[in-house]
Amino acid sequence: MAAPRRAALALSLAALACACIPPTEPWLIDRPIAWGIRASVVQPGGYSSGLVVPAGQARATALPLDTLELEWAGAGPPGTTFAPPIWLALSSDNLGDLVRAGPLEPCPDLVPLALDRPCLLGQGERLRFALGGAFTNGDSQFLRIRVLALASAGDPATCLERLQTDPPPDLTDCELMTRALALGPLPSLLDAIAEYLPPEIELPEIPPEVADDEPDTHPRILGFDIARESPAGRVALFAADGDTVPVRAGERVIVAVRFDEFAAQKYDRVVRTDPPTNRIDTMTESLRVRIGLTTLVDGYTPIGAGHAHRWIAPDSREPVDVFFHVTDSREGRAFARLRFVTEDAS
């Protein structure tokens, strides 16, 4: 009966990692939550020597021997604080491995691309670690690094202890977020690992023109175009990340994210057809803007593709924090926050 019990444990832990009691509206942030994980290459290794990253950009995919910086973002009502999260490198998508692993050891200085068991990366809102060489991938074809951030307004170490308990006790005060980080760019990655894979694994041929693509980078938010509309007229202004924006009760507020010109990158995707033919599709990244408001408001509506959002300014003295989480259709991520204060609240 051991196997069914393990399966049930895996399902329960997966649910705990991504779900709690849903708010009345999907965009309402009425409690502390995990908001996102961003990973950036901060020091290239030997396999990255031929990659050129445009000035002011940060690479979103890593190669073996690169050093990555993980950044955790939390969100919550005004005044919410989190202790710095504990970071783990996972050996699979099954969080039940944490229970079976027993006491966790620190990860090696160079974290293998394929792990036999979970390990501790460290603690901090930002954390850096270096990847192992191409040979540490073994015969894995998944080519992803799995990480977990465990945060809490209290002690994340207590949350980790609970998470490793079978069956796990209440994790209500613990915020878990996992992410599988794709390695890349693909042409450079395949060149790096090819000689270490078993001969029966057939790798796709990458046309030379694909190898010239710019590396995948994070979208950059320049700021926000804001409009305040009322019977008296329309007021337009620009705000930067972290700004406080004054509004008046009953105004219709429209917020649009302003990206830099390189936010949605063009790239080539290789589509395998009948050997030995490969079709190359030229793609443009799509950008998705997810937002969360810390107060219930009337009239909330996303506009168009979701790059803009509108709502009615509430008649309340409580500030409304608005959190932004931008994802592109590859590995890029960006976070931002604005605060709206109603000047004439009764």
Image: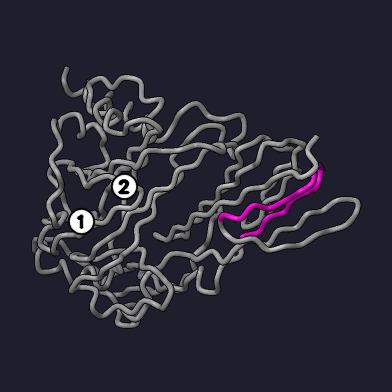
Residue 190: image x %, image y %? Answer: 21, 69
Provide the residue designation for mark 2.
124
Residue in view at x 66 percent, y 59 percent: 256
Label 1 neighbourhood size at 10 Å, few (<14), some (14-19), many (20+)? few
- What amino acid is found at the position of numbered circle 2 in the picture? Gly
Direction from residue 116 to residue 128 in the image, left or right: right
The disc, 2 or 1, on the residue closer to the chain's N-terminal end is: 2
User: In the picture, residue 90 is in which quadrant?
Assistant: top left
Answer with left or right where residue 341 lies relative to residue 333: right
> What is the secondary structure assignment of the residue under circle 1?
loop
Q: Nearer the viewer, residue 316 or 71?
A: 316
Residue beneath disc 1: 141
Q: Nearer the viewer, mark 2 or mark 1?
A: 2
Q: Is residue 185 left or right of residue 305?
A: left
Quarter of the view holding residue 182: bottom left
Instruction: Looking at the picture, tell me which residue is in the foreground, 161 or 328.
Output: 161
Using a 10 Å C-alpha cutoff, classify the residue at mark 2 as few (fewer than 14 neighbours), some (14 to 19) or many (20 or more). some
Q: Is residue 289 left or right of residue 225?
A: left
Q: Is residue 150 magenta?
A: no
Q: Which residues are magenta?
A: 242-257
The tag on residue 259 is none
Q: Say how the picture is coloured.
A: one colour
Q: Residue at x 13, y 40 (%)?
A: 105
Q: Position of residue 45 (x, y in %)?
A: 20, 70
Kind of residue sitting beneath label 1: Gln
Question: Where, quadrant-wise, is the N terminus in this rendering?
Answer: top left
**Residue in the picture at 16% in, 20% down:** 2
Q: How many marks?
A: 2
